[in-house]
Amino acid sequence: MSITQNQFEQLTEMGISLWQSRSTDKESDAVSTQPISYLDINLTELANQQLFTDILLATGLTIGEVSHQGDHLDLGLFNWYFTTSPSADTIQWQEQQLFTPSIDNISKSPALKKQLWHLLGTQAQ
């Protein structure tokens, strides 16, 4: 069953995740997946971003409680990954892990901000 982009965005905003079947490689019958690439994280630069400090404030954390762990930030309650995946225009929550585009991209998009605040309000408690 296929859905329109508008339907997908509405379901995503409501916190409903959708699964899509992936094509298989006929020679090996293996599922083809695209690797997720992660953005480099500069915690000092993030600390200067208003949206990031607002998120920390909303979660009850200070910058001192956030630790940089290679490809993600450890916020204690959850791990935050900044991705450049093909679905970089969405925010995903999976098992105490938050996957988002860069803070710059989120701050420029009202839909991404809304989605992020919704997820943080419902998941990161």
Image: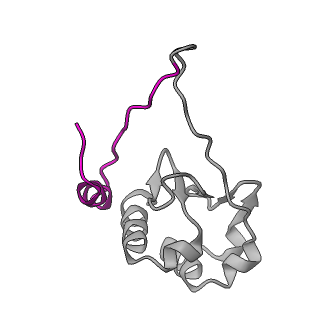
Write the residue at 68% across / 85% down: 48
Give how far across and how far down residue 78 sits, in percent: 56, 55
- Residue at point 61%, 46% (across, down): 36
Percent coordinates x, y for residue 115 in the rendering: 38, 66
Answer yes or no: is residue 69 visible: yes
Residue at image point 24% right, 47% down: 3
Up/down of 39 relative to 43, above or below: above
Residue beneath the point at 55% across and 63% down: 101
Q: Is residue 4 magenta?
A: yes
Q: In the picture, which quadrant includes the N terminus? A: top left
* Drawn side of residue 50 relative to residue 120, left or right: right
Q: In front: 48, or 40? A: 40
In the image, 28 versus 125, the foreground residue is 28
The reply, left or right, for residue 36 in relation to residue 108 is right
Quadrant in the rendering for residue 110: bottom left
Does residue 54 show up magenta in the picture?
no
- Give residue 58's position: percent from left, percent from top: 48, 76
Q: Quadrant of residue 72?
A: bottom right
Which quarter shows the C terminus?
bottom left
Please report the bounds of the magenta region as a residue range. 1-25
Q: Is residue 60 visible?
A: no
Is residue 60 toward the left or the right of residue 114 in the image? right
Number of marks present in the image shown:
0
103 up-or-down from 83: above or below? below
- Residue at the extreme front of the image, as rendered: 27
Q: Is residue 37 above or below residue 20?
A: below
Q: What's the magenta bit mostly, secondary-structure-wise? A: loop
